[in-house]
Amino acid sequence: MTGFIETAEQQELRKAVAALAANYGQDYYLEKARAGRHTDELWSEAGKLGFIGVNLPEQYGGGGAGMYELSLVMEELAAAGCPLLMLVVSPAINGTIIARFGTEEQKRRWLPGIADGSITMAFAITEPDAGSNSHRITTTARRDGGDWILSGQKVFISGVDQAQAVLVVGRTEDHKTGRLKPALFVVPTDAKGLSWTKIDMELIAPESQFQLFLDEVRLPADALVGSEDAAIAQLFAGLNPERIMGAASAVGMGRFAIAKAVDYLKTRRVWDVPIGAHQGLSHPLAQNHIEVELAKLMMQKAASLYDAGDDAGAAEAANMAKYAAGEASVRAVDQAVQCLGGNGLTKEYGIAAAVTMSKLARIAPVSREMILNFVAQTSLGLPRSY
């Protein structure tokens, strides 16, 4: 991307992803979600076309592009009513961390499968008593000879049932100080001692949420990704892409809602004029469009900074993009329901299903309140309250 203008390749990628998504659409997505099934066909085709691994290195089967291109894929899928949550997790968080910090063997083992979609990797950081405070993680890893023994619990872990492995954020003990330090481990989902239970959610989505239990899970030495001394830096190398992808999903959802409303306002007639002629409906929707486009610009800035290697600049922009996109998409979905009236709450029109999903953009992967904390402290230099 040069300035605010996408390259010809990026524009072509948008068109290609949009064309793929149009073959599936929201009806396919909701049908799978309501039946408790996964969007395996769409995921597989996206992988074969190179969309899932577009950000991963070419030598490991990826497209050799960056987070900008992957966020573009996410945005276009969401705009078509097919936001694939595991795109945030598998290639953006895990693929990025392994590509940047993994051993050569780990890269060869995991990245080609992540890139073509044949391997899906979940990510486990949140804990029942830790929440947004990653410093309070209690999942611990101890050495036993050449192995690691991992024990603890995780909560709100997406898509474990469709994953072949989970990247788990645990803690190891610094024997010099006795302090616990974050460390990252790849845990195969068939590992002995790993189990999970499904969390009942009101979200209509093909990806389920789970609570994970790690009961003395024995892992080989090479399950550790990167250095056990640098995991905070390694962790945030994956969390910035997570925020960018969260913003992309919300931008796409906002576009989806606005498009549904615009189509309805053009065709629904009352007193012999399309209801979209009334400013009471057209002005709020125009405002929604402006807000979504502004959030998209910040998302593009964040992705561009990240791809340029500016992790600090990308962190600020990614948090701002995630906040702006979450707020814009919630308002766009709400206004779309209002524009459609009673039809906005029917299954037929497909907006009601987006109401709870849009709220997710304000909560995950980081809450709007924690983003405001980050901006107050980092961007404005204000003191911490915690």
Image: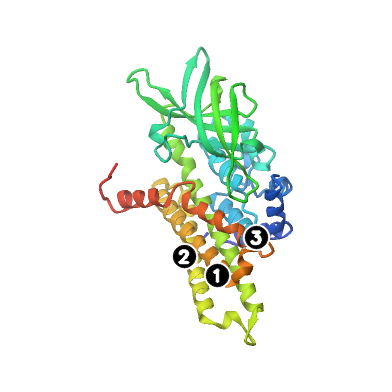
Q: Looking at the picture, how far across and down is residue 315, in whole percent?
A: 41, 48
Q: Nearer the viewer, residue 43 or 363?
A: 363
Above or below, 202 against 342 in this view is above
Q: Amino acid at mark 1?
A: Gln
Q: Amino acid at mark 3?
A: Ala
Q: Which residue is mark 2?
A: 294
User: Residue 256 placed where, x, y %?
Assistant: 60, 63
The mark closer to the camera, 3 or 2, is 3
Check disc 2 and report its element: helix, strand or loop. Answer: helix
Q: Earlier in the sequence, mark 3 or mark 1?
A: 3
Residue that badge 1 annotates: 338
Which residue corresponds to mark 3?
Answer: 80
Percent position (x, y) of residue 52? 64, 47
User: Which residue is found at the position 68% from the left and 42% from the top?
Assistant: 116
Q: Earlier in the sequence, mark 3 or mark 2?
A: 3
Whether residues under marks 3 and 1 lie with C-beta atoms below 8 angstroms apart, the answer is no
CA–CA distance between discs 3 and 2?
20 Å
**Residue ID at (57%, 29%):** 104
Front position among marks 3 and 1: 1
Task: Look at the numbered discs 2 and 1 and tell me whether their residues touch, using CB distance below 8 Å.
Answer: no
Q: Residue at x 52, y 19 (%)?
A: 148
Furthest residue in direction bottom, as rendered: 272
Is residue 104 shown to the viewer in this render? yes
How many tags in the picture?
Answer: 3
* Real-space CA distance between mark 2 and mark 1, rounded to the nearest whole angstrom: 22 Å
Quadrant in which residue 277 is drawn: bottom right
Image quarter of residue 342 = bottom right
Q: Secondary structure at mark 3?
A: loop
- Of mark 2 and mark 1, the one earlier in the sequence is 2
